[in-house]
Image: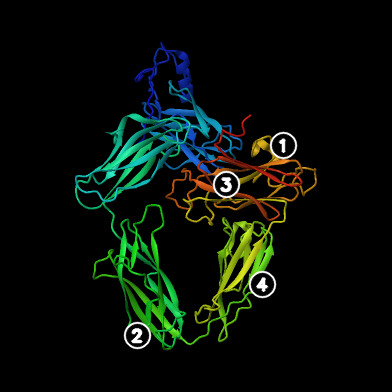
Amino acid sequence: MQKWQMRPRAATRATRLTLCGRPAAVLLAMLALLGVAATGCDSPETIGTPAMITDRGDFVFPKLQPGEQATRRITVRNDGDADLIMVDIALDDRSTGGEFALFGDQGAGAGPIPDGGRLVLAPGAEMAFEVRYSVADESNDTGAVTMQTNDPDNLQVNWPIRAGDIGGEISVSPRSLDFGEVQVGQTETRSVTITNRGLAQLSISRLELSGRDGFDVLLGGESVAGVRETPLPVPGQGTIVLDITYTPQGLGPADGLLDIQSDAINGASTTVNLYANGAVPCINVVPGSVDFGAGLLVDSRDEPTPNQRVLIVENCGTTPLRVDRIEFEDPEGVFGAMQLPEPVDGNLIALPGAVAGEDFPTADLEVGFWPLDLRVYGGRMLIYSNATPADEPTIVDLFGRGVDNTCPLPLVAEDLFEVQPLDIIDLDGGPSTDPDGEVRSWRWTVVQRPEGSVSQPVESFADPRRPADGGEDDDTGTPRALFFVDLTGEYVIELQVVDALGQPSCEPNAVARVTIRAVPQKDLHIQLVWSTPDDPDETDTTGTDVDLHLAHERADGLWAGPAGEWDCYFRNTNPDWGVIGEVTDNPTLDIDDTNGAGPENINLAEPEIGVSYEVGAIYFRATSTFGDPEVDRQAEHPSYVSLRIYNRGTPLVELVGQELTETMQLWHMATVTWCEGAGCPRIDIVDEVYSEGEYNLP
């Protein structure tokens, strides 16, 4: 349902207007637009009057990041009894990079409107004017759509276009409420916080509940559900807290939906899912079946077996899970648990209920295979828990075949690398052998790395000039892989090999290890990493963006663009500081990560003696869908940022876990003063966080 913006009119309906005896200027303008010539007064021509009604009067865009796009519409309806004629339609684009485009939609899809265009709208018809905004930079862009019409109350139309930090922007948390178990006759309450992240007032026009009866919305103890006669205001940068109650009308699970409708520029509708009485135990076993493949023969069931697999038991429900019995069904008795947990209160496994937004509680269960002959075996593991009826255990199928095979031997061409950060390592498992066959698979796994490192072995880099962006997954069918050393510190990478029968390398030579020690050789080496808990995969191509900054003292306390050439960051990656033309006193941003977690590095080979450098980080993009179309693209996500500063491999300072919550926040971390002698260089910790608008002040 569209909301129409009504306006007072000069007359309710001027159905019979004539040139004679009327104000001539208005009517002549109308006739000119209609293309009707003025005639004499002896036989007056009667004409109708168009009436231009719009659902809003401006195009307002939220704050967007470069590269993002958004669309805003104004719907026009002709509420009169004559054609509405719109001429000299123009887009006044005052953006810095021609970032606005104007389209019209009369029901057959949006098409571009040329400058000076003309459109006609019949009585009772409606259409939409659409402005598309493709953001090129961080400026708060403006513009307008203008036209002339033959509506006497709207001869000149000017719809402003505004983008940036204006208008109410809604953020709702949490987006899902679980009321747990609620008995009939009882009432349970949960809270929802509505935050206006914009500068202008936010007006909430409707709080609509759907789904099962029993849910209500309270503000100050009074129900506010339904259409609001007076919109509920949320001041700029302000919050309100709504109490959502559930009083069940009957037994059984219940779910509902709260639809919050407002004039927010980042979306007119925001929903909150509601759940109650759905708390039940739930068990999930990963994997659901186990194939041991080729299992080495053993002499008896009583000796250790190299054929082992680990299963994970998950509690996927919101109430505790209890496993009280595990049994194995196989005629030969070749399958079994390596070691069952000691029972606690009669339970082999006890897991707490799952918490929304967190990983499922889990327990490991190690299963073994003891083949005695060269043949195929099959069996089942039965898991009895409170998540299933007593006579319906969770079943895990077990398979394996006995082989008389010697394990392959993993070997590497080089097991120790002493390198600098940003080097590329060639991992080579070519020397690996199989005494009674051939090696078919080489599996490289990073088992130790510096905190914040995200690099993985790859078959090749997508862009060899930007190895930090990763590349094609390692092909386990080849013995070699490439590894990008993204941070200072020590790495350990293990190699496991598999033979043609599917037999992996086993103890005592299950893996070969490669150690990498990365030590920077520059006088000043700065590392930035961050973690975004809402990002399910910080190694993919979508995520938040925190930028590392190193500002020269000649920046005079300014950052990024206002600092000009005196801030080294992603838009000024290698400025010429110190002696003009001398490269050793110039900093370089060697990694700019834009999709989550980092790292980012700045190196400075020879800092200027007596000069101070400011180290900071700016939360350039706090919004992301993380590749999930269901995630609100306008919601800002907290990230936790860490900094390390080194002098030729010697750590000088480490600041860990500073929370940044909003786009363009600045974390001013430290001041580095370069000097000679004892106590040099000097590090002064600043550790101050500023919102946009609180720094780069004149």
Of the numbered discs 4 and 2, the one sitting upstream in the chain is 2
The CA span between labels 1 and 4 is 47 Å
Of the numbered discs 3 and 4, the one sitting upstream in the chain is 4
The CA span between labels 2 and 3 is 59 Å
Of the numbered discs 2 and 1, the one sitting upstream in the chain is 2
Of the numbered discs 1 and 4, the one sitting upstream in the chain is 4
Q: Is the residue marked by circle 2 packed among few (<14), some (14-19), or many (20+) residues within 10 Å? A: few
Q: Mark 4 points at which residue?
A: 414
Q: Position of residue 238 (x, y in %)?
A: 43, 33
In what quadrant of the picture does the C terminus appear?
Answer: top right
The CA span between labels 3 and 4 is 36 Å
Q: Position of residue 389 (x, y in %)?
A: 24, 66
Helix, strand or loop for disc 3: strand
Helix, strand or loop for disc 4: loop
- Badge nearest the viewer, 3 or 4: 4
Helix, strand or loop for disc 1: helix
Residue 136 against residue 161 in the figure, above or below: below
From the viewer's side, name the closer residue of 643 and 330: 643
Contact (Cβ within 8 Å) of mark 1 with mark 4: no
Of the numbered discs 2 and 3, the one sitting upstream in the chain is 2
The CA span between labels 3 and 1 is 23 Å
Residue 90 visible in the snapshot: no
Residue 441 against residue 136 in the figure, above or below: below
Left or right: 95 in relation to 188: right
Q: What residue type is labelled 1?
A: Arg
From the viewer's side, name the closer residue of 207 and 448: 448
* Tag of residue 332: 2
Contact (Cβ within 8 Å) of mark 4 with mark 2: no
Left or right: 607 in relation to 193: right
Q: Name the residue under label 1.
A: 554
Helix, strand or loop for disc 2: loop
Q: Is the residue marked by circle 4 packed among few (<14), some (14-19), or many (20+) residues within 10 Å? A: some
